[in-house]
Structure formats: C-alpha cells, structure tokens
C-alpha cells in the first residue's frame, strides 16, 4: 500500500526566512509560496531530488498548525507524506485495521492538486501521516 515518501513537512514561524535558509544557505531549489486556505496554511516546497521538504506557516484563523507553533515556537517536523495508488482503498484498509483517519474521512485536495488524507499520530508511531494519491 505504502508508496514513496512524497515530502517531509516542517512548520515554521517565518516562511520567508525558512525558505531563504533552504535557498541561500543550503543552495536548494525552493518553489513559490502557495496559499492553501482550505488547509489553513501557506506552503513552499524544497526540491531535495529524491523527495521534497514542505515548509508551512499558519494561514488565517483557526489554522491547524497554529497550536503546533505555540508548543514549538521555533518550528519543527510536523508530518510525513507517503504516496498511495488509491486513497479510498487505503483509507478503507486503514479504518478496517482500526487506525484513525482525521476529519470526516473524505479526502481533500492537497498542495499538489491531488487527494490527501491525514492519519492520527497516536496510531502511527507518534507521527502525523499524510497520504497522497500519486
Ligand atoms: Co504535507
């Protein structure tokens, strides 16, 4: 079921500053900013060749990453995103296995224009997991 690692996501307090560190200090290729109001975040993607790093900061009221930043003011690793071939089949398999799918279990459209779901960190070794249909 589990495909390749699509990205590692890091929540940051200052997206422009974090993007500059990756672009200027680490010499990486960094995408333009992308606002995702439905997810309450603004993101950039860092190309690491074999995968990506997603840098995200809160957008708007009630952002799901605002409380994360309160607990981790300098930012930190937030989630891992794995690709799956069929997100509905993956969801149904995981629910049948007793894993908790966040929200109402209906995939939302993610930063790459593809359906995504999030899985409860307590069911996945303490890590928030995003699934993206490849
Ligand atoms: Co993500």
Image (tube, grey):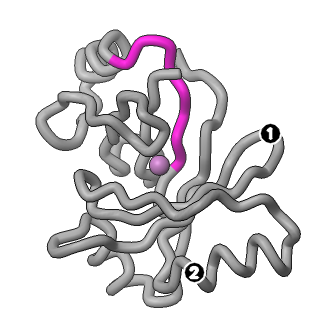
Rendering coords of residue 76 (x, y %): 54, 73
Q: Which mark is residue 62?
A: none
> Predominant secondary structure in magenta?
strand
Tell me the residue that label 1 is attached to.
50
Q: Which of marks 1 and 2 is nearer the N terminus?
A: 2
Q: Which of 81 and 63 is in front in this view?
A: 63
Q: Nearer the viewer, residue 32 or 70?
A: 32
* 123 left or right, relative to 102: right
* 51 left or right, relative to 24: left
* 87 left or right, relative to 22: left
Regarding mark 1 in the picture, which secondary structure is present there?
loop
Rendering coords of residue 35 (x, y %): 38, 60
Q: Quadrant of residue 69?
A: bottom left
Q: In which quarter of the image is residue 106?
A: top left
Rendering coords of residue 123 (x, y %): 35, 41
Q: In the rendered image of this protein, does residue 124 appear above or below residue 67?
A: above
Residue reaching furthest to the front? 32
Residue located at (44% from left, 89% from top): 73
Q: In the rendered image of this protein, does residue 119 appear above or below residue 47?
A: above
Q: Which of marks 1 and 2 is in front?
A: 2
Tell me the residue that label 2 is attached to.
16
* 110 left or right, relative to 54: left
Q: Which of 98 and 102 is in front in this view?
A: 102
| Distance in Å between CA atoms under marks 1 and 2 | 23 Å
As for residue 8 lying within the magenta part, the answer is no
As for residue 84 lying within the magenta part, the answer is yes
Read off the magenta span.
80-87
For the residue with label 2, is its CB less than 8 Å from the closest atom of ligand 1? Answer: no
Residue located at (61% from left, 55% from top): 45
């Amino acid at each position: 079921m589990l495909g390749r690692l699509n990205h590692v996501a890091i929540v940051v307090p200052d997206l422009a500053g974090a993007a500059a560190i990756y672009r200027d200090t680490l010499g990486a290729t960094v995408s333009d900013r992308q606002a995702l109001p439905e997810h309450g975040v603004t993101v950039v993607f860092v190309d690491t060749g074999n995968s990506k790093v997603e840098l995200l900061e809160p957008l708007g009221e009630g952002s799901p990453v605002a409380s994360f930043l309160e607990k981790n003011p300098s930012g930190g690793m937030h989630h891992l995103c794995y690709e799956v071939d069929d997100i509905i089949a993956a969801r149904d398999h995981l629910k049948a296995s007793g894993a908790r799918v966040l929200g109402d279990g209906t995939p939302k459209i993610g930063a790459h224009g593809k359906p995504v779901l999030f899985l409860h960190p307590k069911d996945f070794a303490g890590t928030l997991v995003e699934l993206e249909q490849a």
